[in-house]
Image (cartoon, grey):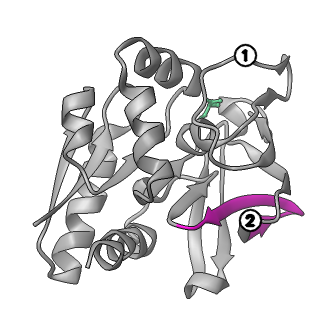
Amino acid sequence: SLTVGVLSIQGDVQENLISAKTAVDELGIDVQVIDVRTPEEISQIDGLIIPGGESTTIGQLSLVNGSLKILKEKIQNGMPVLGICAGMIMLSNTADDRVVGKTDQPLLDIFDIKLERNSFGRQKESFESDVSLDSINIPKFNGVFIRAPSVSDVGSDVEVLSKFNDRIVAIKKGNVIGTAFHPELTEDTAIHKYFINLVNTSKN
Ligand code: GLN
C-alpha cells in the first residue's frame, strides 16, 4: 500500500497526521499515514506533507540530519508534496521576510516564486477568511492564516490556485502544492483529500 509521510521535525505535525488519516478514511483507500524525520524514513514514502511551523527551524534541522537532500531528490523525481505555510516557504526558491528582508535559510528550491514571509503580520494578526480554490474544485474553504507567507509572483510553471486580497495564497506545480493557510486547523478535509488522491493517482 501507499505511504504518506508528515515531516515531523518541527511544527503542527499531530494536526496533519489527524487530518490526513481522516481524509484517507473518508476516501476509503489503502494509504498509511506516518510521521517521518530521518532520511531512511523519508526514503520509504510516496507523498509528503510539510506542516506549518517555523521554516528556518525546519530547514536548518532537516539540512543537518541529511533529510533536506533526499527530500529534494524525491520531489524532483515526482513525489507529491503538500507544503503548508512554513512548508510552502520550504518549497520556495527564495524567502524574504516582511520585516527583516531576505533570509538565508535552507530551502528546497522547487517553486520559482516571489514569496514574502510573515506577509500578513505577527501572531496576533492571525485571521480566518474563506478562500476559493476553483481549479481543484474546492470553491469554498476556511483559510486559517497564522504568520502566513504570501506570494506576489510565480514562474510560468507554477499555477495560482487561490488569492486573498490580491495576494497569492495557494499554488501548484505538477504534484507539488503550497498553501499559505492551515487546512489541518479546520474540520474540512477537502485539501487533504485532494492531496491523498493526488498521491494515489500518481502512483497507480
Ligand atoms: N512565519 C513562519 C515562517 O516564516 C510560518 C508560519 C506558519 O507556518 N504558520 O516560517
Q: Amino acid at mark 1?
A: Asp
In the displayed structure image, the side of residue 16 where residue 165 appears, left or right: right
Residue 104 circle label: 1
Nearer to us: label 1 or label 2: 2
| Magenta-drawn segment | 161-174
The foreground one among 75 and 195 is: 75
> Residue 84's x, y, as percent?
52, 48
> Residue 86's x, y, as percent?
57, 37
Q: Label 2 near label 1: C-beta < 8 Å?
A: no
Magenta span includes 168: yes
The Cα atoms of the two marked residues, 1 and 2, are separated by 24 Å
Q: Residues within 10 Å of mark 2 (few under 14, many from 20)?
A: few
| Quadrant of the image containing the N terminus | bottom left
Q: Is residue 50 visible?
A: no
Q: Determine the residue positioned at 56% across, 88% down.
A: 137
Which quadrant of the view contains residue 9? top left
